[in-house]
Image: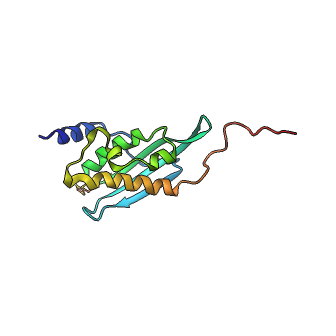
Amino acid sequence: MSDFEDKVREALAQPQNQGEMSDADSVGTVGSPDCGDMLRMWLKFTEKDGKRVIDRASFQSFGCQTAVAVASMATELLKGKTPEEAAQLSADQLTGDLGPLPPMKIHCGQLVEGALRDALGQAPEKTTAPTTAPTLSS
Ligand code: FES
Ligand code: FES
């Protein structure tokens, strides 16, 4: 059993953030032509210290265990990131401690990256009313 398989098994024992998010601000979907798998990712934003950040992320994957493990890791990693920071994360970075993925499984990480980018692209500019009321100067 390779180190990689061990790590995937460990991640799959307790996948994080799995399932549809009913109050999401955006959702992204991608399919992989390599294996016919599909992954969907939901994002919920919030305001923190005057910045818009990802409050929660969740996912659903149909089929591939590696993609589930990577998505579980990635959705944890995304919490607190601004959309700009999230957009800069590579498939490798999203894979976190699971990586580096074996060559056959590289596209599983790319699937997660693709779903994230799609979700970021779908995100509305503003989601919630500003938490601090605007000050009136007059
Ligand atoms: Fe089965 Fe990717 S679809 S391993
Ligand atoms: Fe295709 Fe993992 S997403 S094998």
Report the quarter where the C terminus lies. top right
Tell me if residue 11 can be seen: yes
Q: Is residue 52 left or right of residue 4?
A: right
Q: Nearer the viewer, residue 59 or 108?
A: 108
Q: Nearer the viewer, residue 107 or 46?
A: 107
What colouring style does the render use? rainbow
Tell me if residue 63 can be seen: no
Q: Nearer the viewer, residue 99 or 19?
A: 99
- In the rendered image, which quarter is residue 15 located in? top left
Residue 89 in picture, x, y percent from top left: 40, 47
Residue 59 in picture, x, y percent from top left: 39, 48
Report the quarter where the N terminus lies. top left
Q: Residue furthest right?
A: 138
Q: How many marks?
A: 0
Residue at position x 32%, y 54% from top? Answer: 110
Q: Is residue 25 left or right of residue 65?
A: right
Q: Is residue 41 above or below residue 14?
A: below
Residue at position x 37%, y 52% from top? Answer: 113
Q: Residue furthest top?
A: 49
Q: Is residue 93 left or right of residue 22?
A: left
Residue 16 in picture, x, y percent from top left: 36, 39
Residue at position x 35%, y 44% from top? Answer: 93
Residue 92 in picture, x, y percent from top left: 32, 47
- In the rendered image, which quarter is residue 77 located in? top left
Residue at position x 62%, y 38% from top? Answer: 50
Q: Is residue 56 left or right of residue 97?
A: right
Q: Quadrant of ligand 1?
A: bottom left
Q: Residue furthest bottom?
A: 33
